[in-house]
Image: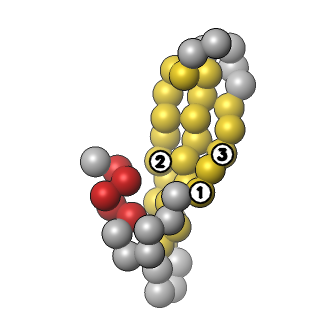
Amino acid sequence: MKISDIKIYTLDAFRTNWAFIKVETDEGLYGWGEATLGTQEMSLEK
């Protein structure tokens, strides 16, 4: 099994933003994680 894709979803919340990460595998499995950095969520997307 290998990681085939990583997607980042940034959601606008009132005072901060949330960053959720979806990791997908070549076998069709996936998992979710949360990686919020307060006001610096854009650094995750680079």
Q: Is residue 39 left or right of residue 4?
A: left
Q: Residue at x 34, y 69 (%)?
A: 40
Question: What label does residue 34 carry, if any?
Answer: 1
Residue 5, position in %: x, y? 49, 27
Q: What element does badge 2 sit on?
A: strand
Residue 45, position in %: x, y? 34, 50
Q: Residue at x 52, y 20 (%)?
A: 4
What distance separates the C-alpha of mark 1 from that of mark 3? 7 Å
User: Which is more N-terminal, label 2 or label 1?
Assistant: 2
Q: Which residue is mark 2?
A: 8
Above or below, 26 against 15 in this view is: above
Furthest-right residue in this view: 29
Quadrant assignment, res 39: bottom left
Residue 13, position in %: x, y? 52, 78
Quadrant assignment, res 27: top right
Q: Which residue is mark 3?
A: 32
Classify 10 Å Cα crowding around label 3: few (below 14), some (14-19), many (20 and above): few
Q: Residue at x 50, y 65 (%)?
A: 36
* Amino acid at pointer 3: Trp
Above or below, 13 against 5 in this view is: below
Q: What element does badge 3 sit on?
A: strand
* Amino acid at pointer 2: Ile
The answer to the question of whether label 1 and label 3 lie on touching residues, with beta carbons closer than 8 A, is yes
Point out the image quarter for the N terminus. Answer: top right
* Amino acid at pointer 1: Glu
Furthest-bottom residue in this view: 15
* Disc nearest the viewer among 1 and 2: 1
Q: Is residue 2 left or right of residue 39?
A: right
What distance separates the C-alpha of mark 1 from that of mark 2? 10 Å
